[in-house]
Image (cartoon, rainbow, N blue to C red):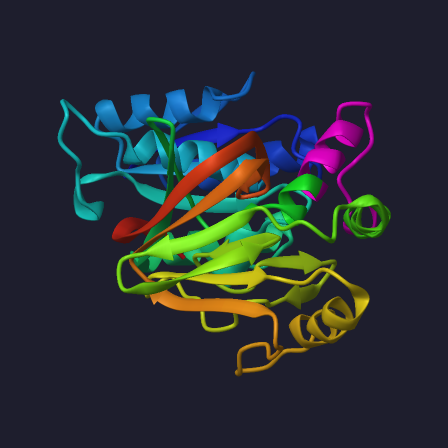
Amino acid sequence: MRAMLLVNPKATTTNQRTRDVLIRALGAAVDLTVEETGYRGHAASLAGTARAKGFDAVAILGGDGTVNEAVNGLLNTVNGEARDAEHRPALIVIPGGSANVFARALGLPNDPVEATGAVLEALREDRRRTVSLGQAIWDGESRYFTFCSGMGYDAEVVRAVEGLRGTGRKATPARYVNTALRHYLTTDKRTPAMMLTGPGIPSVAGVFMAIISNTSPWTYVGAHPVEPTPWASFDTGLDLLGLQRMGLPSMLPLIRQILTERDSLPSGRHLVQLHDEAEFTLTAERPVAFQLDGDYLGERESVTFRSTPNALQVLV
């Protein structure tokens, strides 16, 4: 097997010595080419090159942002024609970021050394899983996501944390929680901006924030999963949880529910919920914050979300 390993040298949970050990271990199992990412979008470009050169797999040593870029590089069309999962390089993920939601949702250990052991076992047994992806489309642009997207409050929190990372602070779970709490105190809780529409879906107005999920959990607080859409799966369409109220009487019961591992959907009078949908659109009266796999992508007034079934093979 020919594999290209994309290494994010700024990955938060590995150092050079650990990366060297992991590279040697992978190199003993496959014909390995190693590339370091150097700038935003570089992983997408490298993954596209691996696809064009006929590599069998693309491995990622990095966080969810690097994984997302690589997936988009693999999913881009070739000569105007989309390829199915069997004709794209398979994906190998070794967690190296702060959250590693995609890798953990696949069942991989969060420790990069243990995850490498699991990946080597999957390589020996040629153990693959085909997963669906989500796609967000706006203003003539589109981008795939592996586990989640969001519009409104959660994207505003992502934006705030990215601003702190720009000053050299790490994106730890505690920083996300503290930022979310501080931002909640100042956010607009009176004038919701968004409307939900879609084929066969009753229109719903007055939505403050929306979480769109391709799998569950949505994220982690340390080792603890956060599950606003517990039925979401890599084997189904997209799920959504929307909030029509942001006051404490609505938020506190919801927070308790999504922090509790359960099989049932969250309950509440002012929740909007979808499960296993192929497509829907969020339209806003004013530009609202938009994030995708934890990457802030600016403010948008309309985004269409689509499920892409059987999009990618993952060695896991």
Residue drawn at (61%, 61%), measured in percent from left and top? 243
Nearest the eye: 183 or 257: 183
- Residue 120 shows in the view: yes
Q: Residue at x 45, y 32 (%)?
A: 69
- At x 59%, y 81%, the residue is 262
Please state if 43 lies on the left or on the right of 82 as rendered.
Answer: right
Q: Nearer the viewer, residue 73 or 307?
A: 307
Q: Position of residue 195 (x, y in %)?
A: 48, 52
Q: Check if residue 234 falls in the magenta segment.
A: no
Q: Is residue 174 magenta?
A: yes
Residue 63: percent from left, percent from top = 58, 40
Q: Quadrant of the C terminus?
A: bottom left
Is 5 on the left-hand or right-hand side of 174? left
Q: Residue 315 vs residue 210: left or right?
A: left
Residue in front for this viewpoint, 143 or 274: 274
Residue 164: x and y in percent read: 80, 30
Number of numbered labels in the structure image: 0
Magenta portion: prevailing SS class:
helix
Q: Magenta segment, which residues?
A: 157-175
Along the line of sight, which residue is nearer the eye, 282 or 162?
Answer: 282
Residue at 51 percent of width and 33 percent of height: 300
